[in-house]
């Protein structure tokens, strides 16, 4: 076949144009790929230059056009390559434009009218340009070596042409020229295309999160390396075309389809779900799946970001634990309990069962901390938690409510047996405590007070039940310790009143609402008043007159008794000083609570009150109840010892109502016994009370104690007591508690009485 050179040229120009059009198209689709348009411009200029040579008229515009196309072509290839390699800067473009303009002018000036020069210069410039570009691409650390080598070959061919080294067999020349040109252009197109692709895959591969696109059939269409790692697969490529369920153990195709349906029907995107997946390597992984809509060929696909949330979950778990569990014992804390208790109650409500809440408080826990340190205290709490856990049923709840308070909840109890079962569990706990705790190196025994409230009888919600169990527990503490008591609505009324009283009492001293009254204690035989008991009175601005039986226990609970007691001590001593002239030998007896006696500042207060009023210590007597003595034996003994050293006398109040243990009397160096009113009241009518009082009096005598009978209301009682040998009498029969003024008047009536006549009743 005989093909003319023009046909070859036209064929070559046509191919050039098609390939250039592809480059322009790629640039149009991906406008960021500027090297595509630069290369296309370079190649188009080169094609135009060829057309100029072979098709144009042979005059000066042809030289100008040829010079211009050469310049644009070299500039285009240069700019495209630099941009492709990422080394093109804005200033380079401006400088390049100037250099190339100059270059074009020089070429035109040198070659105008000399077509052979221009041809050779053009071939040489192209040759050098392609050699240089080929070298840049092949030597740079990228995988466009083939493109580089083809361009080097193209450059060498052009140079060989310029130097007339190519044997001119026109078909071979054209075929070779066409091949290198077409090859280099195809490689350039591939470079542009691949760079776009690479940028996309590099971007998703560089994500620290897994990226998966799967279609409505669950088939993975795209995935990055991170997702492969998360699913325990070696290469992302292996995932493509497989089913999601093939990689996630324990997740069926149906579950994948359900996920797709949830995602497709979601109202908002991204649609987020968390789950624990087991990868192909068997590793369990908590993940968050963030799904967005993605369309490929018109079909909805699910584009998933798969985030490994192991750390976040561990943090969440840690926060959850901190919010719901106590870190010393590992038990539920108050918040955790309230959530679980609410659940238990609604279950009990639905099933018609009862629940019992046991509020357990370790008695005198503070002493453990004080004596053995806080580490030992924590150790004790841990052992207590273990002890309580021991008796626990599967559904039972156990919580540390605060400090030394624990709560056991027995859910789902039969309604008619709930109280018995709660009592049995409580008693079991109290018994177990008897074994003691080994706090290395010593074994210590503590008791606990337990209050119980039952659902639905004592409350309908968790807060109320816990509050009521707490009130019942405090009721135990008030009257002793180490017992279990059920909530009674009367306790609640007391607790409410206590709250009101406590609030009002706090400002009572400053508001001047307190005063003292004095009740005479007279000598049974002579009727003379040797002693008075100072009794506190409170006329509250808001509550009116409040009796000491109501506010003293509240002040003892809250600790306010220390402040009140200090005021009573100071006031009683200063009153005694004011009576110095009229009642020089009078002894004042004041009531002292346990907390006051154990307050380290108490002895100093007594000393100061005496010295400030120039009173002999024997003129002060302190009344303690038996409950004070059974408290902290060692500390009480020390405090009483120091008071006795000071010369202050101690009297045991309300004797007979508490433990009535004779050992207290000898142990604590008591001076006086005050026989409780309850025995005195009954002694005339009840032989038993009479016998009891007689026994106490006889015992007092044998121990060398002074005896005072409280609550003497009748002459018969007074007579009987005197006959028994009781030394002193106190009661309404002698006098009610009166103010300081009235007391002086009373003293006046008793001054001359040497022998006790029959008391007026
Ligand atoms: P208490 O120490 O046993 O005081 C005697 C209580 O019996 C006084 O009640 C007194 O008014 C009352 N009483 C005296 N004689 C008779 C009588 O013949 N018949 C009857 N029915 N009652 C009689 P008050 O003043 O209401 O005091 C009650 C308790 O309050 C006191 O019992 C004492 O334990 C406590 N209290 C009073 N003042 C103080 C105080 O300043 N400090 C402390 N810690 N406790 C105080
Ligand atoms: Mg008293
Ligand atoms: Mg008393």
Image (cartoon, rainbow, N blue to C red):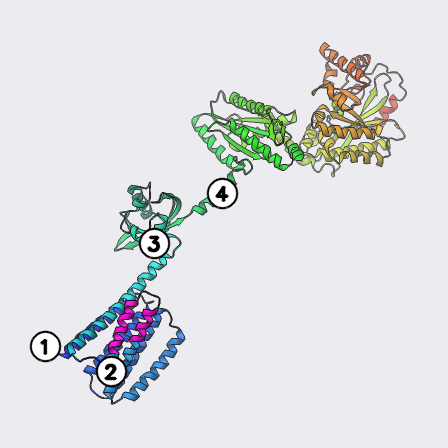
Lower position in the chain sequence, tag 1 or tag 4 = 1
331 falls in the magenta region: no
Say which quadrant the C terminus sits in. Answer: top right
Q: Circle 2 sits on which residue?
A: 163
Numbered marks: total: 4
The N terminus sits in image quarter:
bottom left
The mark found on residue 674 in the picture is none
Q: Nearer the viewer, mark 2 or mark 4?
A: 2
Q: CA distance from mark 2 to mark 3?
A: 52 Å
Cα distance, mark 4 to mark 3? 31 Å
Instruction: Give the CA separation, mark 2 to mark 4.
Output: 79 Å
Q: Which residue is mark 4?
A: 318
- Using the numbered discs, state the Cα–Cα distance from disc 1 to disc 4 in whole angstroms: 86 Å
Residue with the most extreme left position: 1
Question: Which of marks 4 and 2 precedes in the sequence?
Answer: 2
Query: Do callouts 2 and 4 mark residues in contact (Cβ within 8 Å)?
Result: no
Q: Which residue is mark 3?
A: 224
Image coordinates for residue 43, horizontal then vertical, percent: 26, 75
Give the mark nearest the N terminus, 4 or 3: 3
Q: Secondary structure at mark 3?
A: loop
The residue that appears at 74% across and 38% down in the rendered structure is 511
Residue found 82% across the figure and 14% down from its top:
725
Q: Position of residue 565 (x, y in %)?
A: 75, 33
Would you name the residue on which mark 1 appears? 2
Which portion, as a residue range, is magenta? 130-158
Give me the residue at 89% from left, 28% from top.
Answer: 582
Mark 2: secondary structure: loop
């Amino acid at each position: 076949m005989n093909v003319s050179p023009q046909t070859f040229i036209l064929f070559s120009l046509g191919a050039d144009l098609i390939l250039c059009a592809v480059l322009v198209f790629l640039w149009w689709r991906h406008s960021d790929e500027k090297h595509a348009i630069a290369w296309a411009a370079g190649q188009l200029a080169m094609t135009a230059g060829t057309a100029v040579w072979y098709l144009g008229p042979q005059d000066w515009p042809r030289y100008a056009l040829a010079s211009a196309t050469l310049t644009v072509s070299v500039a285009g290839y240069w700019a495209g390559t630099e941009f492709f390699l990422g080394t093109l800067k804005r200033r380079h473009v401006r400088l390049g434009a100037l250099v190339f303009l100059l270059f074009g002018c020089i070429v035109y000036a040198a070659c105008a009218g000399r077509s052979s020069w221009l041809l050779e210069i053009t071939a040489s410039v192209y040759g050098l340009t392609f050699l240089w570009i080929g070298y840049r691409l092949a030597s740079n650390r990228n995988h466009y070596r083939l493109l580089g080598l083809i361009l080097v070959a193209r450059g060498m061919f052009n140079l060989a042409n310029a130097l007339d080294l190519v044997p001119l067999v026109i078909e071979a020349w054209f075929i070779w020229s066409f091949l290198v040109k077409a090859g280099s252009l195809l490689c350039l197109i591939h470079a542009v295309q691949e760079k776009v692709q690479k940028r996309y895959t590099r971007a998703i591969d560089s994500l620290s999160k897994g990226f998966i696109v799967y279609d409505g059939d669950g088939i993975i269409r795209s995935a990055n390396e991170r997702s492969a790692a998360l699913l325990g697969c070696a290469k992302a490529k292996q995932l493509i075309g497989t089913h999601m369920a093939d990689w996630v153990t324990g997740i069926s195709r149906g579950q994948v389809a359900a996920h797709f349906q949830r995602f497709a029907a979601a109202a908002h995107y991204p649609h987020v779900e968390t789950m624990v997946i087991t990868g192909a390597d068997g590793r369990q992984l908590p993940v968050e799946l963030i799904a967005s809509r993605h369309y490929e060929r018109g079909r909805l696909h699910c584009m998933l970001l798969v985030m490994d949330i192991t750390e976040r979950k561990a943090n969440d778990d840690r926060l959850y634990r901190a919010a719901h569990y106590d870190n010393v014992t590992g038990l539920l804390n108050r918040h955790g309990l309230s959530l679980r208790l609410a659940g238990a109650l609604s279950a009990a409500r639905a099933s018609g069962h009862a629940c019992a809440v046991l509020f357990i408080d370790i008695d005198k826990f503070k002493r453990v901390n004080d004596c053995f340190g806080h580490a030992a205290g924590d150790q004790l709490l841990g052992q207590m938690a273990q002890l309580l856990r021991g008796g626990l049923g599967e559904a039972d709840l156990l919580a540390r409510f605060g400090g030394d308070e624990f709560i056991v909840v027995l859910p789902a109890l039969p309604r008619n047996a709930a109280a018995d079962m709660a009592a049995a569990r409580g008693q079991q706990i109290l018994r177990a405590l008897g074994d003691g705790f080994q706090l290395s190196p010593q074994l210590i025994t503590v008791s606990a007070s337990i209050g119980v409230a039952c659902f639905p009888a004592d409350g309908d919600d968790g807060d109320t039940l816990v509050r009521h169990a707490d009130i019942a527990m405090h009721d135990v503490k008030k009257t002793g310790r180490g017992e279990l008591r059920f909530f009674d609505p009367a306790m609640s009324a007391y607790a409410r009143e206590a709250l009101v009283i406590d609030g009002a009492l706090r400002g009572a001293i400053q508001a001047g609402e307190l005063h003292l009254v004095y009740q005479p204690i007279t000598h049974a035989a002579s009727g003379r008043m040797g002693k008075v008991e100072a009794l506190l009175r409170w006329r509250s601005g808001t509550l009116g007159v409040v009796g000491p039986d109501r506010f003293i226990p509240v002040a003892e609970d809250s600790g306010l008794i220390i402040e009140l007691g200090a005021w009573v001590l100071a006031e009683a001593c200063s009153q005694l000083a004011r009576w110095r002239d009229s009642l020089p030998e009078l002894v004042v007896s004041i009531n002292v609570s346990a907390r006051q006696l154990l307050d380290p500042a108490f002895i100093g207060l007594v000393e100061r009150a005496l010295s400030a009023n120039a009173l002999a210590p024997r003129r002060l007597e302190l009344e303690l109840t038996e409950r004070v003595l059974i408290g902290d034996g060692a500390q009480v003994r020390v405090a009483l010892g120091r008071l006795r050293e000071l010369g202050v006398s101690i009297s045991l109040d309300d004797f007979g109502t508490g433990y009535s243990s004779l050992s207290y009397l000898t142990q604590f160096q008591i001076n006086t016994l005050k026989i409780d009113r309850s025995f005195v009241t009954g002694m005339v009518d009840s032989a038993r009370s009479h016998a009891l009082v007689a026994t106490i009096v006889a015992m007092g005598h044998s121990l060398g104690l002074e005896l005072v009978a409280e609550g003497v209301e009748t002459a018969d009682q007074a007579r009987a007591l005197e006959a028994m040998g009781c030394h002193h009498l106190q009661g309404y029969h002698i006098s009610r508690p009166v103010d300081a003024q009235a007391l002086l008047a009373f003293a006046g009536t008793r001054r001359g009485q040497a022998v006790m006549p029959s008391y007026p009743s």
